[in-house]
Image: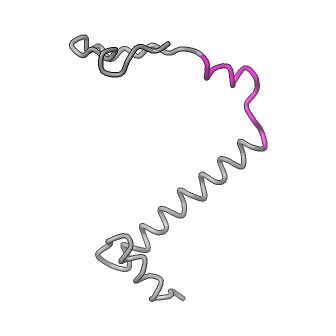
Amino acid sequence: MLDRGKAERIRTLTGASSVSDAVEVALDRYLRQAELRNDVAAYLRVPPTADEAALGDIPVRLDLDDDEIDYDALYGRPD
């Protein structure tokens, strides 16, 4: 049974135009949070190997093929 008071509070908080839209927003947010919690729990059970962790230290050169923009001037030069 849907608690109309909670549904109305969610509608007000989300700015949804209807209770149905508010429920849809609430379900989407709940699912994203639950998936994130599950992903974090899985990561904690099986942390990355040393090789996988080392990949994070590999420098990456980003080439957007837009020579007219001086990214070093905008953002600084990486160390």
Q: Is residue 7 left or right of residue 43?
A: left
Residue 48: x and y in percent read 73, 31
Residue 53, picture quadrant:
top right
The percent position of residue 28, horizontal first and vertical second, equals 47, 62
Residues drawn in magenta: 45-57
Q: Is residue 58 above or below residue 52?
A: above
60 sits to left or right of 47: left
> How many badges with numbers are in the image?
0
Q: Quadrant of residue 64?
A: top left
In-front residue for pair 20/53: 53
Residue displayed at 54% across by 14% down? 59
* Location of residue 11 with respect to 44 vertically, above or below: below
Q: Looking at the image, which residue sits at the far left?
A: 68
Residue at 37 percent of width and 77 percent of height: 11
Quarter of the picture containing the N terminus is bottom right
Say which of 71 and 67 sits in front: 71
Residue lying at 36% horizontally and 77% vertically, measured from the top left: 12
